[in-house]
Image (spheres, rainbow, N blue to C red):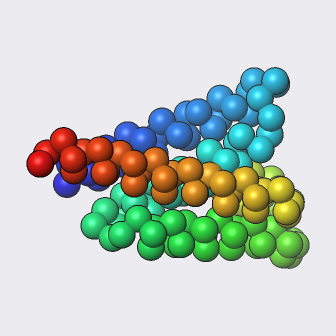
């Protein structure tokens, strides 16, 4: 239970940083996509706190890639949904290969940070 609280705090912090990254003009746009992937990783982790980190990384990549490829779908209803705040932040605006790259690096970063932190914590408790 405690780990879900920690993951939720990280999740909310990443959302804040992601929104902030879009408001500061000198921060490159790919940082927001990178943080989006980190956020997805910790969102999945909230729901599956006991699963192995590698599985969380794979599921997170699948979600991020699916959302990105969904941007190629241009039916009228989803185009209208993308015009809303929810649609813009969750579904995105248009497909970019650079987003796929940012998602891959974001999830790899979250995975490695979690592995390093978990190894550190487990060594401290021995």
Q: Is residue 74 left or right of residue 117?
A: right
Q: Residue at x 39, y 54 (%)?
A: 115
In the rendered image, the vertical position of residue 61 relative to residue 12, given as above or below: below
| Residue 81 seen in render | no
Q: Quadrant of the N terminus?
A: bottom left
Q: Nearer the viewer, residue 126 or 61?
A: 126
| Residue 91 seen in render | yes
Q: Residue at x 67, y 60 (%)?
A: 104
- Give x and y (percent) for residue 56: 45, 67
Q: Is residue 91 left or right of residue 26?
A: left
For residue 53, what is the image quadrant? bottom left
Q: Residue at x 68, y 73 (%)?
A: 66
Q: Nearer the viewer, residue 79 or 19?
A: 19
- Give x and y (percent) for residue 97: 85, 62
Q: Is residue 23 left or right of residue 20?
A: right
For residue 24, what is the image quadrant? top right
Q: Nearer the viewer, residue 15 or 60?
A: 60
In the rendered image, the vertical position of residue 7 relative to residue 95, given as above or below: above
Q: Is residue 112 left or right of residue 124?
A: right
In the rendered image, the vertical position of residue 1 relative to residue 97, given as above or below: above
């Amino acid at each position: 239970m405690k780990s879900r609280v920690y993951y939720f705090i990280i999740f909310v912090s990443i959302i804040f940083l992601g929104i902030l990254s879009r408001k500061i003009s000198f921060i490159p746009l790919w940082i927001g996509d990178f943080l989006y992937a980190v956020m997805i990783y910790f969102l999945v982790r909230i729901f599956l706190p006991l699963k192995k980190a590698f599985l969380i990384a794979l599921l997170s990549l699948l979600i991020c890639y699916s959302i990105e490829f969904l941007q190629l779908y241009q039916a009228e209803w989803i185009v209208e949904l993308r015009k809303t705040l929810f649609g813009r932040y969750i579904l995105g605006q248009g497909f970019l290969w650079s987003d796929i790259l940012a998602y891959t690096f974001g999830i790899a970063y979250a995975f490695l940070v979690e592995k390093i932190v978990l190894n550190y914590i487990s060594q401290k408790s021995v």
